[in-house]
Amino acid sequence: AGIYRETVLIDGKRLHLRSVDGPEATVVDAQGAGRALTLVNAGGGPCTIEGFTFTGGAANTGAGLLIDGSGPLVRDGTGGGKTATQSGGGVLLSVTFTTVRLERCVIAGNDGGSFSGGIDTFYAFDVELDGCTITDNTAANGAAGMAASAFSEVALRDTIVWGNHGPQPFFVQ
């Protein structure tokens, strides 16, 4: 438990990172110094991130969480207060060739700049959101809540996308 004022990079690791006290008590605050969490190149096997709040991220894309070339499970997570100048204020899922699963996550209060405030899937081939809430995110020109681009297959189960602020709440290209 605690507030960790830093950015986190997990590159090619197979691990299960779990907070004992949950997202209310375990916070990673990037303080505007970059993405709060970056998961890349997880060719070594599955990666699970469980029970954290990620906040304070700033980047062109994927300010809160960037998942690139990886297929993790993110469970019981909270993300808010992040700003991207282009897209994916909360989460950017990019070029994932395996399943990315978000369970019981709250993606709220993010600014996506031009496009996609909450979640952006960019060539994320298999995305599952189960029991998630995507709310109070903003985008100037695109999907404030969630954008699913070409070649992305997105399954929403018991997930709500509501109360987002922008031209479209949900966009499928």
Image: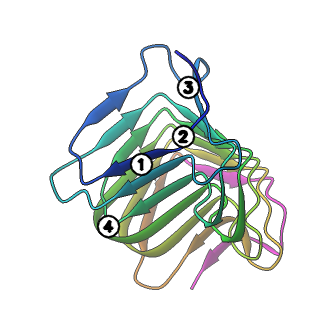
Nearer to us: label 2 or label 4? 4
Quadrant of the frame with the C terminus: bottom right
- Amino acid type at image mark 2: Cys
Based on the picture, tell me whether residue 44 belongs to the magenta stretch.
no
Name which of mark 4 and mark 3 comes first in the sequence. 3
Q: Residues within 10 Å of mark 4 (few under 14, many from 20)?
A: many
Q: Height in image: 123 above or below 77?
A: below
Residue carrying label 3: 23
The local crowd at label 2, few if under 14, some if 14 to 19, many if 20 or more residues have their Cα within 10 Å, is many
Q: Amino acid at mark 3?
A: Pro
On residue 105, the disc is 2
Upstream in sequence: badge 4 or badge 1: 1
SS at circle 4? loop
Mark nearer the N terminus (2 vs 4): 4
Q: Secondary structure at mark 3?
A: loop
Q: Residues within 10 Å of mark 3 (few under 14, many from 20)?
A: many
Region rendered in magenta: 159-173
Task: Using the image, tell me which numbered label, if any, was put on residue 69.
Answer: 4
Residue at (49%, 13%) from the top-left corner?
21
Which mark sits nearer the N-terminus, 3 or 1? 1
Q: Which numbered tag is attached to residue 9?
A: 1
Q: Does the residue at mark 2 contact the one at mark 4 (Cβ under 8 Å)?
A: no
**Is 108 left, or right, of 147 in this rendering?**
right
